[in-house]
Image (tube, rainbow, N blue to C red):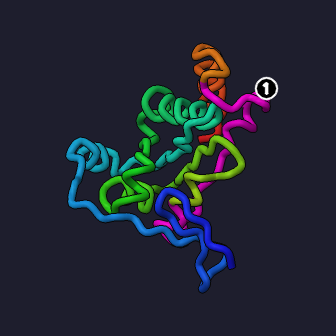
């Protein structure tokens, strides 16, 4: 089996060839604002994690998740810090683990957010929503600089409104 290396991750696992094994350095650092937010949102029924990718689709998903959680459905939703939830078992991961419903708003079909968190929390079953399937745009575009900020905001709002209608 060939081994692939990227960003410190080793891409082969001889015991489980369908998975990658990633070693993450532990840290003693904890963000107090993040922990306070997690405590405040602990009883919120829906946790929303999303793609945080640097491409256009990830940017639309990220903005849509923020609109859902911080503007359109604030009482029902908690916005997950994907990096915090994935790399450290503190408040953000608890929000994911304990939510009555978990939504993974993915930028595209690669489904990075949900795949990452399934690795951190075995057996996790988020409702996966592919943001780019909810909008019409030129599928050949990749970078956030290939679309105006106003167009990105409009697409993010469209995605957010469609998701909120299903909550």
Residue 143: x percent and y percent?
64, 29
The residue lying at 62 percent from left, 72 percent from top is 3
Q: Which residue is drawn at the image coordinates 65% and 24% (left, top)?
A: 155
Residue 52's x, y, as percent?
A: 52, 41
In the rendered image, residue 144, in percent from the top left (x then y), is placed at 60, 26
Residue most extreme to the bottom: 15
Q: Is residue 35 left or right of residue 4?
A: left
Locate the C terminus and report the quarter of the image it occupies: top right
Classify mark 1: residues with Cα within 10 Å, few (<14), some (14-19) or many (20+).
Answer: few
Tell me the element at label 1: loop
State which quarter of the image contains the N terminus. bottom right
Q: Is residue 30 left or right of residue 161?
A: left
Q: Which residue is mark 1?
A: 138
Rendered position, 115 above or below 3: above
- Position of 143 with respect to 77 (left or right) is right
Q: As rendered, which of 10 and 150 lies closer to the eye?
A: 10
Q: How many numbered circles are shown?
A: 1
Give the residue displayed 23% in from the left and 45% down from the top.
36
Answer whether residue 11 is magenta in the image: no
Q: Is residue 38 above or below residue 58?
A: below
Residue 134 colored in magenta in the image: yes
Residue 67 as seen in the image, left or right of residue 137: left
Residue range of the region highlighted in magenta in the rendering: 117-144
Q: Nearer the viewer, residue 2 or 24?
A: 2
């Amino acid at each position: 089996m060939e081994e692939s290396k990227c960003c410190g991750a080793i891409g082969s696992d001889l015991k489980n060839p369908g998975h990658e094994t990633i070693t993450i350095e532990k840290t003693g650092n904890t963000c107090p604002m993040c922990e306070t937010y997690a405590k405040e949102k602990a009883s919120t029924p829906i946790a929303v994690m999303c793609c945080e990718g640097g491409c256009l689709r990830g940017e639309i998903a990220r903005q849509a998740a923020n609109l859902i959680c911080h503007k359109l459905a604030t009482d029902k939703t908690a916005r997950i810090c994907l990096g915090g939830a994935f790399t450290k078992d503190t408040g953000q991961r608890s929000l994911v683990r304990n939510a009555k419903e978990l939504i993974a708003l993915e930028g595209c079909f690669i489904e990075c957010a949900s795949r990452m968190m399934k690795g951190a929390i075995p057996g996790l079953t988020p409702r996966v929503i592919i943001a780019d399937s909810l909008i019409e745009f030129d599928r050949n575009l990749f970078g956030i600089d290939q679309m105006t900020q106003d167009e990105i905001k409009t697409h993010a709002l469209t995605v957010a409104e469609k998701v909120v209608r299903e909550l």
